[in-house]
Image (cartoon, rainbow, N blue to C red):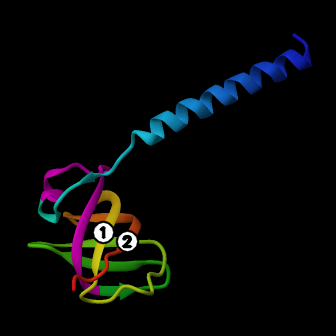
Amino acid sequence: MEEADLLKIALVVSITGLFILSIVSSKLVAEEKTLAEIDDFDESIYVTVKGIVSSVERNDKTTVIEIQEVVRKKVIVFWDVDDVAKGDSLIVEGKIDEYKGTKQIIGDNIVKQKPLK
């Protein structure tokens, strides 16, 4: 095969792969769960949870946010979350993880909800 033919094949395969990847990624949606339901799911499940911040602990490379509904769960993020404080209402997307026998969420996205008036 000539170099031009190989280049055409590589281009077609790359474009096809990107198309398939975009279709698959659009179907990946985080399931909305309550904090109490987190214990019933396996690790690595991607979820969306809502809760009120009960504590925030900032470290060098992580921020640990404890949120609560009826139960409390920790949300671990690997960036500094400056604008989150106790009493804030959050929506968190992330992956369920287990640390020392306790389920927690590794946060990928945090959205601060506006307070109700």
> Residue 68's image quarter?
bottom left
Q: Can you see residue 99?
A: no
Q: Which residue is disc 1 drawn over?
A: 91
Left or right of 11? Residue 34 is: left
Q: Which residues are magenta?
A: 37-55
Q: Residue at x 46, y 72 (%)?
A: 78
SS at badge 2: strand
- In whole angstroms, how far apart are the C-alphas of marks 2 and 1? 5 Å
**Of pointers 2 and 1, the one earlier in the residue sequence:** 1
Q: Residue at x 54, y 35 (%)?
A: 21
SS at badge 1: strand
Amino acid type shown at disc 1: Ile
Magenta stretch holds residue 54: yes
Given residues 97 and 21, the one toward you in this image is 21
Q: Which numbered dot is residue 38?
A: none
Residue 40: x percent and y percent? 13, 52
Q: Residue furthest bottom?
A: 86
| Vertical order, 13 against 77 (above or below) | above
Q: Residue at x 61, y 34 (%)?
A: 18
Residue 47: x percent and y percent? 29, 55
The N terminus appears in which quarter of the rendering?
top right
For disc 1, the neighbor class at 10 Å (few under 14, some 14 to 19, many from 20) is some
Amino acid type shown at disc 2: Val
Check contact, mark 2 vs mark 1: CB within 8 A.
yes
> Residue 27's image quarter?
top left
Left or right of 105? Residue 20 is: right
| Vertical order, 117 against 27 (above or below) | below
| Vertical order, 85 against 35 (above or below) | below
Q: Which residue is disc 2 drawn over?
A: 111
Q: Can you see residue 81?
A: yes
